[in-house]
Image: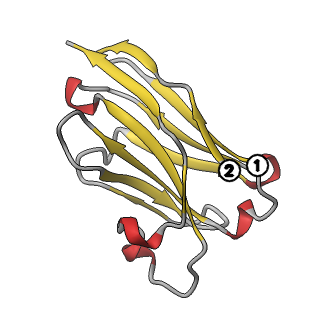
């Protein structure tokens, strides 16, 4: 089970740090990702991190502003969001993938992920 936290209301230019807690026992075997869904829009990829955290992948829209990290000892993944913009407003979901053997570049695809959290709301005011 994946549970996100850390969302809230922030002014443009501000920062937030989201957390994703995994209650399962196999967290370190999951490739992890963040996705977001804004009102009236489809869910979109934000970023992903490999099993040991050595590889990350980001959407162009957040590259240089957002940073993904993970702590396998605590079964946690994080999304540090800086320089937030109103267009970052969305519900942010974490996801876990059981797939192995895929090239890192494919982890932006929703279908690669097997487990999803309920999401946490991030609202950025202008």
Q: In the rendered structure, which disc, 2 or 1, sits on the residue that comes first in sequence?
A: 2
Query: What residue did someone put label 2 on?
Result: 1
Tell me what residue is drawn at x 42 percent, y 69 percent: 107
Residue 5 is drawn in which quadrant? top right
Horizontal arrangement in the rendering, residue 21 relative to residue 117 (left or right): right
Answer above or below: position of 98 versus 36: below
Count of labels in the image: 2
Tell me what residue is drawn at x 22 percent, y 33 percent: 39
Residue 46: x and y in percent read 36, 50
- At numbered mark 1, what does the secondary structure look like: helix, strand or loop? loop
Residue 27 is drawn in which quadrant? bottom right
Residue 75: x and y in percent read 75, 50
Horizontal arrangement in the rendering, residue 27 relative to residue 17 (left or right): right
Dot 2 surroundings within 10 Å: few (below 14), some, or many (20 or more)?
Answer: few
Report whether residue 103 is seen. yes
Q: Quadrant of the C terminus?
A: top left
Report whether residue 12 is seen. no
Answer above or below: position of 31 versus 45: below
- At numbered mark 2, what does the secondary structure look like: helix, strand or loop? loop
Q: Are marks 2 and 1 in contact (CB under 8 Å)?
A: yes
Horizontal arrangement in the rendering, residue 59 relative to residue 2 (left or right): left
Residue 58: x and y in percent read 36, 56
Tell me what residue is drawn at x 58 percent, y 82 percent: 100
Tell me what residue is drawn at x 45 percent, y 75 percent: 104
Residue 35: x and y in percent read 39, 49
Q: Nearer the viewer, residue 96 or 73?
A: 96
Dot 1 surroundings within 10 Å: few (below 14), some, or many (20 or more)?
Answer: few
Answer above or below: position of 119 versus 49: above
Coloring scheme of the render? secondary structure
Query: What residue did someone put label 1 on?
Result: 23
């Amino acid at each position: 089970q994946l549970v996100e936290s850390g969302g809230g209301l922030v002014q443009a230019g501000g920062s937030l740090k989201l957390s994703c807690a995994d209650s399962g026992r196999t967290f370190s075997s999951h490739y992890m990702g963040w996705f977001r869904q804004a009102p009236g829009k489809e869910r979109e990829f934000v970023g992903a991190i490999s099993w040991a955290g050595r590889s990350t992948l980001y959407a162009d829209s957040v590259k240089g502003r957002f940073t993904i990290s993970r702590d396998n000892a605590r079964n946690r993944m994080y999304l540090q969001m800086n320089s937030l913009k109103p267009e970052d407003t969305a519900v942010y979901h974490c996801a876990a993938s059981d797939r192995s053997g895929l090239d890192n570049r494919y982890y932006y695809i929703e279908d690669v992920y097997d487990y999803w959290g309920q999401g946490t709301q991030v609202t950025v005011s202008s």
